[in-house]
Image: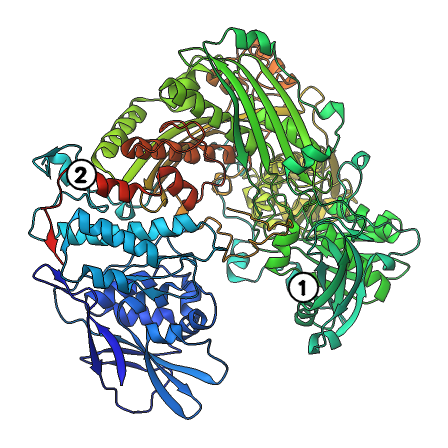
Amino acid sequence: MGFRPSRPRERRGGRVYFSICLFKKKNTKIELSVIDRSIEGIELGSVVSISKAIEVLSDGNLVFRKIADHLNKVASPFVRNTATIGGNIMMAQRLPFESDIATVLLAAGSTDTIQVASKRLSFTLEEFLEQPPCDSRTLLLSIFIPHWGSDDVTFETFRAAPRPFGNAVSYDICLAFGAYGVDHAIRAKKVEAFLKGKSLSSFVILEAIQLLKDTVSPSEDTTHREYRISLAVSFLFNFLSSLANSSNAPSNIDTPTGSYTNGTTNGSTVDSPEKHLKVDSNDLPIRSRQEMVFSDEYKPVGKPIKKVGAEIQASGEAVYVDDIPAPKDCLYGAFIYSTHPHAHVKSSNFKSSLASQKVVTVITAKDIPSGGENIGSSFLTILGDEPLFADPIAEFAGQNIGVVIAETQKYAYMAAKQAVVEYSTENLQPPILTIEDAIQRNSYIQFPPFLAPKPVGDYNKGMSEADHKILSAEVKLESQYYFYMETQAALAIPDEDNCITIYSSTQMPELTQSLIARCLGIPFHNVRVISRRVGGGFGGKAMKATHTACARALAAFKLRRPVRMYLDRKTDMIMAGGRHPVEAKYSVGFKSDGKITALHLDLGINAGISADFSPIMPRAIIGALKKYNWGTLEFDTKVYKTNVSSKSAMRAPGDVQGSFIAEAIMEHVASVLALDTNTVRRKNLHDFESLQVFSGESAEYQHRAAMIQHFNSSNKWKKRGISCVPATYEVNLRPTPGKVSIMNDGSIAVEVGGIEIGQGLWTKVKQMTAFGLGQLCPDGGECLLDKVRVIQADTLSLIQGGWTAGSTTSETSCEAVRQSCAVLVERLKPIKESLEAKSNTVEWSALIAQASMASVNLSAQAYWTPNPSFTNYMNYGAGTSEVEVDVLTGATTILRSDLVYDRGQSLNPAVDLGQDYKTNSDGLVIHDGTWTYKIPTVDNIPKEFNVQMFNSARDKKRILSSKGKHLLTMFHFTPRSTFMQSSRHSQFMITAYEKKKKTWHTADLFAASGEPPLLLAASVHCSMREAIRAARKEFSVSTGPANSAVTFQMDVPATMPVVKELCGLDVVERYLESVSAAGAGPNATKA
């Protein structure tokens, strides 16, 4: 016999029934892949894929379709196509696995059939989940979902997740709850019993919520316990309120899925047009718009051609480091890392296992050759190096202790996980894990004076002029992981005469070469580093990639055998370091109209164990902060040394933090003055005439703001916000090499110092090569596009390659290539003219054949260096974003984003448009995989995404185009405007343009378009603040140090629990109490 609850959501005559019945199942043979439809329901074999189950259920009644719709939000299509229904249920039964599927099927009254030895048993899913964890002798055969034939069935599922689709924490309700901090999904039986026969009024719903709070009791070690309870309450309220309002009885309970109007009359809401305003952001169409100005002046530069290598990347044929076929006798490595933040490493051994028997050796600091160094990374050598191995003290959790070398990568991984390391903390001080610890212990990293930013004006005088002051407010920004697709990887192959070749996934081949040479104690020319392409970097393949490369090189050098390693995602996340956590305390003075007169900033940067990129951070943060005119600016910056993995450069390092801090201060000032935040922003922009162009403030913006205000006044449970933020970004140019070689058949090989990381570098270099040699072709060079091949970076073939970072690599690499092409053109012009005298047109192949016969050097190399008076320039942009916040769950939907960006003349417009990183008490990363670290996905793209790019006027010191004229149009700042980074560029541009009053037409390039626009993402965070502020006003929420509804602190990342807490964890209870107090009790529907 099987046992199941009958129709847990069936509604008849306004009542909800929760009855029980018994049914018999024939003792027939069940295939694991069975799909059996009957009048009783649908039976799914345990190995039926989730996708197939969705397909079957979609062609069913209301309940089946609801289940299918929810299952369609689980994981990704790839996972749903391969994962099975039975596998998911078994994981939920055996492990603390937060399963959407188990929760939904539990609510639907499903039963399971299992085989234990020779016995076949049937359980309700609830009973099955409560059994002791199944062992290997238990086989799940099938899952049966009963048929709900009545049209009166009301069945709803609810889900709250960091992203709408994909693996995520979920809460589903049909009085079944899952993923709230216990082992498995359960039925809320006390609540079901209470509701049986009750009238659904605000009093009853409030009582049901109190009972639910006793049922939903997360364990003490569960994260965000209060949020999970509040979320369960929200889902129950959502379901019951919709049930109450769908009946014929009058009700004044505002449904979360609908809207409401303020005010009541005789216990019922006033009817008005707003009562019928229903806007579901999930139903909004996906729209986008891109606006660019194209030019044929430098064709094929500027032409939106297809990205080089797009087909082989999409098909999986592109070769990355781990795709290189393993050389003969290749060995494999995996890191053993410390789990203690500050301890002596006394010994390490392995548990007895098959993997331990496959271990060849363990490489440690003791294996470094005589004359070599224990060095893993280094940026500014004057500030010290970071060791490759802990020796003898592990200084942070996640530090390399050794490298397991095994016969396969699998055995290397397994052995590393089975390593048993003995630690001792004798005679060691406690670790320094936070900025607060570092302050108490005076643990700092000093940085050279030339890297220190400069203050502006007299702060005390500025504060004396202020009408209002905010003192000692605080902003915190946590760390962030790079999450590149390809984790750290390297292959080292020893060669003759103490030479070695390393294939490395790195943004900095030259630095990798030097560190390997220092580690092995050999000359640089004995080390050859090759990088063909990198599967994503964002800064994480710069200094952080050198550890993996050095470890592989050391192992191969010692064992005289090839060694490769590809880090698993968990190890990569633990060792990566990521973005710098920042704490900023500020005091700001301002006038009553919002004009800021003074700002003081105490800036604390958590560098981790070594300097790495950290000394550059203060200058970058303050530089980004200077996008506003603060009147006077004073700051005290500290870089703290702590016992955690060293933080490194990550996508606009420092600029992201500085831009966010600036916006947080603007929001705070606006909230104190009760002014619109954009009004305060405009008051504090630098001097310019065309505010509308820069800030996006327009009649359309005003209309959208008014619409949002109307939406918020008409919707209680969803609130919207809109915000517009400016961005400035200082780009620093670096010397870069380039080499162009023409083969005898006319094909062209190009080498550049930059690395292809997916940013389209090779595509732009290819276009520039065709443009540079285009003078020799009748069509201007377009015929050469298919003849150009950009080859991999090789440190012994093209030296002084520098690094790929700062969003300037395409710009500088292309100019080096253009200069190389110019040399070749000069060599080939005489031959072309000679051939033209005999024939009107000269084909490219004929020209090259003639040049080869004449012994013309068909290879040219250039090393481009920026003009001393033009080593940097400013990028400008603005972003407006509109979001919707679900007050009940904390979920945020980005409805629309509009970006305006001055990127100059794009080399290729088609290429240019292209979470909560937690540690434990020892500083070891615990959000070490996709289950706990949620990256943005396609679902997080704004519903409407519009991008407009400006083409700037040209400047003779830029590459193909400049910002001179446009800079003046947008900002009109003067040489006295010290806040705009007062670089030689800005001074020069204004003086030169004002004197000449014309636009220069000289060959130059484009503006950086990688990192600068990232700063505009702050508009989303600011819009969230506005939406949360509207919710706090609605429910009179005054939590936080300021005890104010409009003034509150929202740090980064703003996860769902953070948003929900700021909106109010108890808003449902407060609302129901207020409705009950207003006399809503008589208006109810029978349950």
Q: Which amino acid does label 1 sit on?
A: Ile
Q: Where is residue 614 shown, x and y percent of the image?
A: 68, 35
Would you identify the image quadrant in which residue 30 lies?
bottom left
User: Is 616 placed left or right of 42 in the picture?
Assistant: right
Q: How far apart are marks 1 and 2 (CA)?
A: 72 Å
Residue at (70% x, 72% y) in the render: 408
Instruction: Please tell me which residue lies in front, 580 or 603.
Output: 603
What residue did someone put label 2 on? 1077
* N-term-proximal mark, 1 vs 2: 1
Could you say where residue 745 lies in the image, as x and y percent from the top left? 67, 53
Numbered label tally: 2
Residue 266: percent from left, percent from top: 7, 36
- Asked if marks 1 and 2 touch (Cβ < 8 Å), the reply is no
| Vertical position of residue 26 compared to residue 643: above or below | below
Question: Who's the residue at 65% across and 23% down the image?
Answer: 636
Which quarter of the figure has residue 89?
A: bottom left
Which of the pair 204/573 is nearer the observer? 204
Question: As drawn, is 669 to the left or to the right of 832?
Answer: left
Mark 2 residue type: Ala
Question: Quadrant of the image for the C terminus?
Answer: bottom left
Q: How crowded is mark 2: few (under 14 residues within 10 Å), some or many (20 or more)?
A: few
> Can residue 693 be seen from the camera position used here?
no
Q: In this view, does 110 lie above or below 632?
A: below
